[in-house]
Image (cartoon, helix red, strand yellow):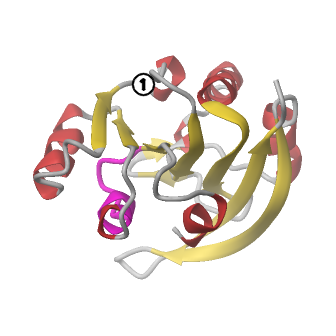
Amino acid sequence: MAVVRRVSAPSEPIVVIGAGASTLLTVLLAEGWQHMVAVDLSAAALGQLRERLSGADDRVTYMHSDVRDLQLAEPVAVWHDRATFHFLTDLADQQRYAERAAAAVRPGGHLVLANFAPGGPDRCSGLLVARHDLDSLRALFHEHFELLESFEADHVTPWGSPQRFLHALWQRRAA
């Protein structure tokens, strides 16, 4: 969340990938963000989000979409994904994701990505996940994005289990 504040302004458009259960939009709305796109594969999760953000339809666009097929109406300043990318276990799907992000983020804009690190779990919500280090992410994103910073940190689940994440901030290269 702090990264979004640092790399963009409330007047700039952002997209939140896997937005259904995220509280990021709630916080950004309270801070005055004006143009947000909430994307989720689950229509039910988007419905719950819309209900939770009641009255924000003028500032939030809800898109029920597979991120691999996502096409936004306009380029965004920030693509924010905390914990969706690692559900793509097939290399072709990961490459398609990277292409969709590059198509969506305007030159100079940012990609904020958090995914399971090599020390993270190999399953989440009963599904297999992909774990990435910086080298594997660079291989996928380097053509269109420059890595600005990264760090690893443990996220502790509500059940008390630590999960190792790799957080990375990328900047979109000029087209």
Name the residue: 54% across, 74% down.
155
For mark 1, give the secondary structure. Answer: loop
Closer-to-camera residue (31/138): 31
Percent across and percent down for residue 101 are 63, 31
* The C terminus lies in quadrant: top right
47 versus 27 height, above or below? above
166 versus 74 height, above or below? below
Stretch in magenta: 18-28
Q: How many numbered callouts?
A: 1
For this view, does 147 lie left or right of residue 112? right
Q: Residues within 10 Å of mark 1 (few under 14, many from 20)?
A: some
Residue farthest to the bottom?
Answer: 160
Closer-to-camera residue (44/72): 72
Closer-to-camera residue (42/108): 108
Q: Quadrant of residue 31?
A: bottom left
Q: Quadrant of residue 23?
A: bottom left
24 versus 89 height, above or below? below
Percent across and percent down for residue 81 are 53, 49
For this view, does 89 lie left or right of residue 117? left
For this view, does 3 lie left or right of residue 135? left
Percent across and percent down for residue 48 are 15, 48
| Amino acid identity at mark 1 | Asp
90 versus 129 height, above or below? above
Name the residue: 81% across, 31% down.
144
Name the residue: 14% across, 57% down.
52
Question: Magenta stretch: residue 68 in it?
Answer: no
Name the residue: 37% across, 25% down.
65
What residue sits right under mark 1 in the picture? 66
